[in-house]
Amino acid sequence: MWGGRFAEGPAAIMREINASIPFDQRLWRQDIAGSKAHVSMLAANGIVTAEDGAAIARGLDRIAGEYEADGVPVDLALEDIHMATESRLAELIGPAAGRLHTARSRNDQVATDFRLWVRDAIDAVDAGLKALQVALVTRAGEHVATVMPGFTHLQVAQPVTLGHHLLAYHEMIARDRSRFRDARARLNQCPLGSAALAGTGFPIDREATARALGFDGPTRNSLDSVSDRDFALDYLMAATQASLHLSRLAEEFIIWASQPYGFVSLPDAYSTGSSIMPQKRNPDAAELVRGHSGRIAGCMTALVMTMKGLPLAYSKDMQDDKPPVFEAHDLLALSIAAMTGMVETVTFVPAKLRAAAEAGFSTATDLADWLVRVADIPFREAHHITGAAVRLAERLGVALDKVPLEKLKEIDERIDGRVFGALSVDASVASRSSFGGTAPDQVRARVAEARAYLGMD
Ligand code: ARG
């Protein structure tokens, strides 16, 4: 394709290091769509004849059929998906194929193809994340009043409801979706027509190609257009953040499924056994989601490092933009699907969750709050009195609301029988009814809002 200036062909190793067809074949649909939009614009503006334009479009359709049926043939000599398609076009329609590349460079071509690919990837991820939200909200609705320990420092802190805990992830995923939406809006400008770097002297219509490809309009600077990969970085950064959320939930499932916790039983369908220990059921899917998030962050870092310090405009380093995006996307799509399956099918064990909430003196704050509210004791003093009550309960080996009243009175005589109304885990969660709090009424309201936002009713 560019041999005119060269006396010799490339060394075998040059072919190998230069070729991107082994991975950029994934862009074939976008490449054909971009070429069709380009050639129809060329014909509409008299830059190629109507006959040549029609022959090129027909040839491209036929190539699409071949790729669909048999895959893209990988020939390193053809370097990349753009050259592979153009060379097949020449076989099919002859010299007219050579007119397709008028007023175009692979630099604006690949920038356009890759934007289109990332846009499709964002749409796929958004659908997956929405399905995960539906699963979370469904399970949260089943457990608006299921009491569990809330943790800080992984130490039992205060009782919360399981529905509240699950909705925390719903919020994270909502932010992820909005990050992907932002990325999509910024991405949706068309670089096609920027040519190699400086624009072109042909009377092209960039508005037309942008519209034909579903972009909001053409990009405004040809140098930036061919050297910008922000859209890929935006995707990777959004993917990294989404995968962090998935890995935190995965980690919780792993902890919760361990025998000392026993908060959940992960379904057989998302677990594996051990080849030596017959009793084992390992949370492999959750562990892989946790692991994949590290790899996704690695992909993000890889492209950051590639782009750092590149002078304008295109440099071949930028060909390395695609593998990390493809890899991250595959890992993320798989992680979202696996996590959705786990959320849908995990069995929660309410008795264990409740027992753990009761075991950790998780209502100590409620005792302190009661002393402030009912006995008008300053919070710092109430905190101190409550500490003594916890020490006593620990010594007696009972929950706070099972310590006999006389014993509590020995600590502070201002405590009376009404205190027991505040010390159960149910009373504790019911009392936390501030907006966004864990009280079942609040969680019920948030579930209803989430269901409406997701169009679940
Ligand atoms: N395969 C190349 C890439 O992915 C296409 C652009 C090639 N442009 C060039 N000037 N060599 O970046």
Image (cartoon, rainbow, N blue to C red):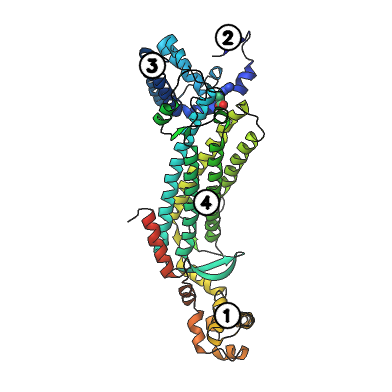
Image quadrant where one finds the N terminus: top right
- The three-letter amino acid code for the residue at tag 4 is Leu
Residue 4 tag number: 2
Q: Which label's residue is closer to the chain start, 2 or 1?
A: 2
Callout 3 secondary element:
helix
In front: label 3 or label 4: 3
In front: label 4 or label 1: 1
**Residue at mark 4:** 246
For label 3, the crowd category at 10 Å Cα-Cα, with few meaning under 14, some 14 to 19 and many 20 or more, is many
Q: Is residue 253 left or right of residue 304?
A: left
Q: Which label's residue is closer to the chain start, 2 or 4?
A: 2
Q: Which label's residue is closer to the chain start, 1 or 3?
A: 3
Residue 146, above or below 84: below
Q: Cα distance, mark 3 to mark 4?
A: 48 Å
Residue 238: horizontal and vertical position, in percent?
53, 45
Give the residue at x 63% y 17%: 12
Q: Which residue is outermost to the top?
A: 7
- The three-letter amino acid code for the residue at tag 1 is Ala
**Residue at mark 3:** 53
The residue lying toward the viewer, choosing from 102 and 14, is 102
Q: Cα distance, mark 1 to mark 3?
A: 80 Å
- The three-letter amino acid code for the residue at tag 2 is Gly
Residue 368 tag number: 1
